[in-house]
Image: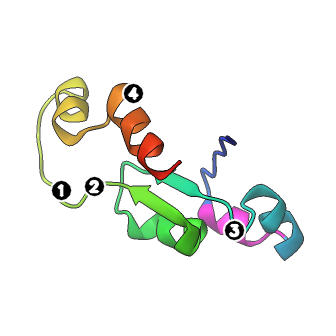
Amino acid sequence: VRIVSVPSEGLFRSQTADYQESVLPKGKKKFGLTAGLPVTLEGLVGSDGTVWGMNSFGFSAPYTVLDEKLGYTGKNVYEQVKKIL
C-alpha cells in the first residue's frame, strides 16, 4: 500500500509523465480522498481508482460533527479502502 499526498493537482500535473507514473502507477488500485468534489481526483486515480468525496455542499456544523455525518472517519475510510483491495 502506498499513501500519496497531492495537495496541488496543478503542480502534480506539471511534472513529467515519468514522475507522475512513478507516483501513481497505471494498473495499480488507487483510492482518492477529498473533502471536495470527487471529480477533482478522478483524473488522477483514473479507471484503476475510486474516489471518496462530497456529493453536496451547504452543511453547517462543527467539523467533527460533519466528519462523522459525511463519513470522514478513520474507520469508514479504512472500510472503503478495504473494499477495493
Camera-nearest label, 2 or 1:
2
Q: Are marks 2 and 1 in contact (CB under 8 Å)?
A: yes
Percent from the top left, x then y, of residue 81? Answer: 46, 44
Residue at horizontal 60%, vertical 58%? 29
Q: Position of residue 72 (x, y in %)?
A: 31, 36
Three-letter amino acid code at the position of disc 2: Met
Q: Quadrant of residue 38?
A: bottom left
Which label lies toward us, 4 or 1? Answer: 4
Disc nearer the start of the sequence (4/1): 1
Q: Which residues are magenta?
A: 9-15
**Callout 1 environment at 10 Å: few (<14), some (14 to 19), or many (20+)?**
few
Q: Residue at x 62, y 57 (%)?
A: 8
Q: Which picture quadrant has residue 61? A: top left
- C-beta proximity under 8 Å, tags 3 and 1: no
Q: Position of residue 43 (x, y in %)?
A: 54, 74
Along the horizontal axis of the image, is 78 left or right of 23?
A: left
- How far is the residue under mark 3 from the one under mark 1? 32 Å
Mark 3 or 1: in front is: 3
The residue that label 4 is drawn on is 74
76 up-or-down from 32: above or below? above
Residue 76 lies, with reference to residue 30, above or below; the image says: above
Q: Which of the two discs, 4 and 2, labels the residue nearer the N terminus? A: 2
Camera-side mark, 3 or 2: 3
Q: Residue 57 shows which numbered tag?
A: 1
Secondary structure of the residue carrying tag 4 is helix
Q: Secondary structure at mark 1?
A: loop
Q: On screen, 31 above or below 75?
A: below
**What residue sits right under mark 3 in the picture?**
27
